[in-house]
Amino acid sequence: MVEAFMLIQTEVGRAEVVAKQLAGLPGVHSAEYVTGPYDVVARVGADTLDGLHRDVVDKVQQVAGITRTLTCPIAETQHP
């Protein structure tokens, strides 16, 4: 499993709506609207890096109201 955090900028006033839309997409584990330079932070995942890009990131970027994304693959996930 490959996971990443997506840092997302949205049009003004669209962060909450975008976060709710993202939460329903396959491969999106969580989506929260936040304050700061980014408006939404999403945790996403797929079986492979190619699948992450093709099946998740591309779909996220098509959501109305998103103006820019930055995808940060997680180097190593710690599980208890």
Image (tube, helix red, strand yellow):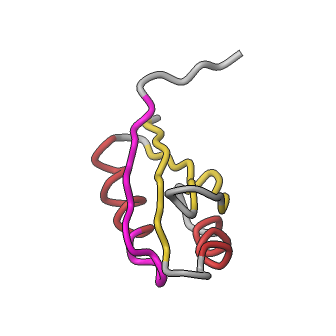
Instruction: Pick the residue in front: 27 or 23.
Output: 23
Q: Is residue 50 magenta?
A: no
Q: Is residue 62 magenta?
A: yes
Instruction: Pick the residue in front: 49 or 6.
Output: 6
Q: How many marks?
A: 0
Q: Position of residue 26 (x, y in %)?
A: 55, 62
Q: Residue sitting at 63 percent across and 68 percent down? A: 19
Above or below for 45 versus 59:
above
Q: Residue sitting at 31 percent across and 59 percent down? A: 54
Q: Position of residue 46 (x, y in %)?
A: 45, 46
Q: Residue sitting at 41 percent across and 25 percent down? A: 75
Judge from the rendering whether residue 19 lies leftward or rightward of residue 37; answer left or right.
Answer: right
Which residue extends farthest front? 36
Using the rendered view, name the quadrant where residue 40 is placed: bottom right
Magenta stretch bounds? 61-74
Q: Position of residue 2 (x, y in %)?
A: 43, 37
Q: Residue sitting at 38 percent across and 61 percent down? A: 69
Instruction: Pick the residue in front: 28 or 11.
Output: 11
Instruction: Pick the residue in front: 40 or 36.
Output: 36
In what quadrant of the picture does the C terminus appear? Answer: top right
Above or below for 56 versus 43:
below
